[in-house]
Amino acid sequence: MKQMPAVHIFTDGACMGNPGPGGWAAILRDPLSGKESRISGAEKRTTNNRMEMMAVIKALEILKMPCRVTLTTDSQYVSKGLSEWLDGWRRRGWRTAGGGAVKNLDLWQRLDGLREVHKLRCVWVPGHRGHPENEECDRLATAAIERLAAP
């Protein structure tokens, strides 16, 4: 059986106000060749958590085949959601451990489907602490918001 290709994905989301205009960005890197792709986008009215999630979704959706993904994010919401909470939410009919509705359900369900395609390993890094790819994703996400607001 052929082994799945590996990819490193770095993501970040940003929001001007919460809710407010928001942006997301991702860097996708082939660990063997070092080849990179950068993607970003923005929405007029959203939240920071939704932009953090959208960065991951958009990055995973552009992969052309199932991959082993090392996902680096500064969002504990995304990291813990993918590695600790998502299976329980699904088992409980998309309810939290406390019985409440899962917030951002539409995006979590998209991520759940993408987890069925790709083998994900999450790495959390503290935001705005000098991690080069995280800082670059923050710049890209902020630039996407600025493009959205430009006349």
Image: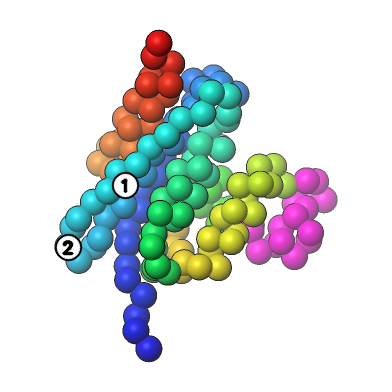
Is 121 rendered above or below residue 101? Answer: below
- Asked where in the image residue 144 lies, by quadrant, the reply is top left
Give, as a single range, the part of the protein colored magenta.
Answer: 84-101
Q: Are there few (<14), some (14-19), or many (20+) residues within 10 Å of tag 1?
A: many
Check if residue 66 falls in the magenta segment. Answer: no
Q: Is residue 87 magenta?
A: yes
Question: Is residue 50 rendered to the left or right of residue 134?
Answer: right
Left or right: where does residue 37 sit relative to residue 151? left
Location of residue 87 with respect to 3 vertically, above or below: above
For the point 31% across and 47% down, the residue is 27
Tell me where residue 69 appears, x and y as whole percent. Answer: 39, 63
Please name the residue shown 35% across and 53% down the image: 9
Under mark 1, the amino acid is Ile
Asked if residue 42 is positioned above or below residue 84 in the image, the reply reads: above
| x and y, in percent, of residue 122 in the image | 44, 58
Residue 47, can we see it?
yes
| Residue 27 circle label | 1
Residue 84 location, quadrant: bottom right
The residue where tag 2 is placed is 33
Q: Tell me if mark 2 has few (under 14), some (14-19) or many (20+) residues whose alpha carbon lies within 10 angstroms of its own.
A: few
Query: Residue at coordinates 31% horizontally, 30% vertically from top-left?
Result: 139
**Mark positioned earlier in the residue sequence (1 or 2):** 1
Name the quarter where the N terminus is drawn: bottom left
Q: Name the quadrant of the C terminus.
A: top left
